[in-house]
């Protein structure tokens, strides 16, 4: 969702166990034994800030190729096409299922003569979160590790200790002895992400950077796989993991224009409201474990919303409803306005601590979202009209 001791190698794709036990994934309520899907771990292990999504897109494409026709475009958005079922091959309608695959990151703007790297945000950051974080920079010669530093509190004047840090006051330290050594490894424009592996918590919950929105790209692909497993739907299904949502909606704009869908379902994250300090009167009640969140509002097509609502009810899939009076802050805002307009729905996953290295979701909600979208896609009969 948009808002305004190691050797320096890449991190692995493992998941730490924060006290949770292993086991198979489950469906309805919180599960102490919800396994993290291998594909999701691989997507989270790949680094891909906005505009630099090649690594996670490659993971997504490799998985999609097992059941769909795959391709990519100049924006870096991968596509998986699931053909319609037998008898509907002639001029089928097309359903676009979309989750963005980029994550927020940092970009190097200056390397000073002491070897420190200065940077700007890629996407929306709370500067307080960045202080003291380990980062991994993507360079032409391979990954370089570093840390985000600032002046220690011991050395701050009394009046400065209460001030919130600003990004312009922070730097990245890669251990270089001077600017020349730093410039041998890093160039202006190299990007970085937080260097942290996923951690599995109690209750079938997962913590990681980049869950916003690798989780959406995972759900889009899983929904497509479930439809393909049933032999296809009456509509062709086009699943995409779009690039650049966190900065321009670039991938959603171009993919929607290119694919010209008859309807679209966007998947993103939304704020879980069971964390301290969140006002449910403003956001609604969307607890972890309460299922996917269906958005209802001005930019959402009412018939698509009702299709998802009725499908979830009939399939006994838990869900909540979120109201949106204007823009959603997701790719939905670009998709529904493309060409002559695209009927669009938004399905979100409740998530705590958005735009941080410790984004937290419940895996049951993730699987429920994929099941819901697949079930709704299979109900389309080719005769629907979304003209208002």
Image (spheres, helix red, strand yellow):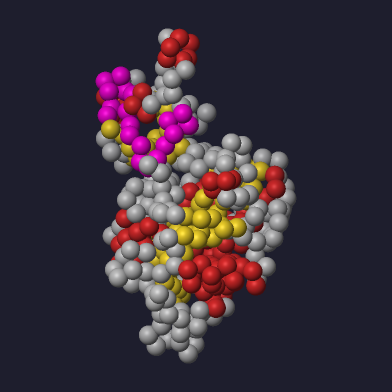
Of 78 and 220, nearer the camera is 220
Q: Is residue 113 above or below residue 281?
A: above
Drawn side of residue 357 relative to residue 58, left or right: right
Of 66 and 142, nearer the camera is 66
Residue 296: x %, y % from top left: 50, 61
Residue 101: x %, y % from top left: 43, 54
Q: In this view, does 193 lie above or below 75?
A: above
Drawn side of residue 292 relative to residue 138, left or right: right
Q: Residue at x 51, y 79 (%)?
A: 380
Residue 288: x %, y % from top left: 63, 49
**Magenta stretch contains residue 112:** yes
Number of marks present in the image shown:
0
To which quarter of the image does residue 200 belong?
A: top right
Look at the image and give the residue range highlighted in magenta: 110-130
Farthest-out residue, bottom: 87
Q: In this view, does 35 lie above or below 259?
A: above
Drawn side of residue 370 relative to residue 237, left or right: right
To which quarter of the image does residue 175 belong?
A: top left
**Magenta stretch contains residue 227:** no
Of 48 and 266, nearer the camera is 266
Q: Residue at x 43, y 12 (%)?
A: 159
Q: Considering the image in quadrants, where does the C terminus appear? A: bottom left
Q: Which residue is drawn at 39% across and 66% down?
A: 79
Is residue 333 among what the camera can see?
A: yes
């Amino acid at each position: 969702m948009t808002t305004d001791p190691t050797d320096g190698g890449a991190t692995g794709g493992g998941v730490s166990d924060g006290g949770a036990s292993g086991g198979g994934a489950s469906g309805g309520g919180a599960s102490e034994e919800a396994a993290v899907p291998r594909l999701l771990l691989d997507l989270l292990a790949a680094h891909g800030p906005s505009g630099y999504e090649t690594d996670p897109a490659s993971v997504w494409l490799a998985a999609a190729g097992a059941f769909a026709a795959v391709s990519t475009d100049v924006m870096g958005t991968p596509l998986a096409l699931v053909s319609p079922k037998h008898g509907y091959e002639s001029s089928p309608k097309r359903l676009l299922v979309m989750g963005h695959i980029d994550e927020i990151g940092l970009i190097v703007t200056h390397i000073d003569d002491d070897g420190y790297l200065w940077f700007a945000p890629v996407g929306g950051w709370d500067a307080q979160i960045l202080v003291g974080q380990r980062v991994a920079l993507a360079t032409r010669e391979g990954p370089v590790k570093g840390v985000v530093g600032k002046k220690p509190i011991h050395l701050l004047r009394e009046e400065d200790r209460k001030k919130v840090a600003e990004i312009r006051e922070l730097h990245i330290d890669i251990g270089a002895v001077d600017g020349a050594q730093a410039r041998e490894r890093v160039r202006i424009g190299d990007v970085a992400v937080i260097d942290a592996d996923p951690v599995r918590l109690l209750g079938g919950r997962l913590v990681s950077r980049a869950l916003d929105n690798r989780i959406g790209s995972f759900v889009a692909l899983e929904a497509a796989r479930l439809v393909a497993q049933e032999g296809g739907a009456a509509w062709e299904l086009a699943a995409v993991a779009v690039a650049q949502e966190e900065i321009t909606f670039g991938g959603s704009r171009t993919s929607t224009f290119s694919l010209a869908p008859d309807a679209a379902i966007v998947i993103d994250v939304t704020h879980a409201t069971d964390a301290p300090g969140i006002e449910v009167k403003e956001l609604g009640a969307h607890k972890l474990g309460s299922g996917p969140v269906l958005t209802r509002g001005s930019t959402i097509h009412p018939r698509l919303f009702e299709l998802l609502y009725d499908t979830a009810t009939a399939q006994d899939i838990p869900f909540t409803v979120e109201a949106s009076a204007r823009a959603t802050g997701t790719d939905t805002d670009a998709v529904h306005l493309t060409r002559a307009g695209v009927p669009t729905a938004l399905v979100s996953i409740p998530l705590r601590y958005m735009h941080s290295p410790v984004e937290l979701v419940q895996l049951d909600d993730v699987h429920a979202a994929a099941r819901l979208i697949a079930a709704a896609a299979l109900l389309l009969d080719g005769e629907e009209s979304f003209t208002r």
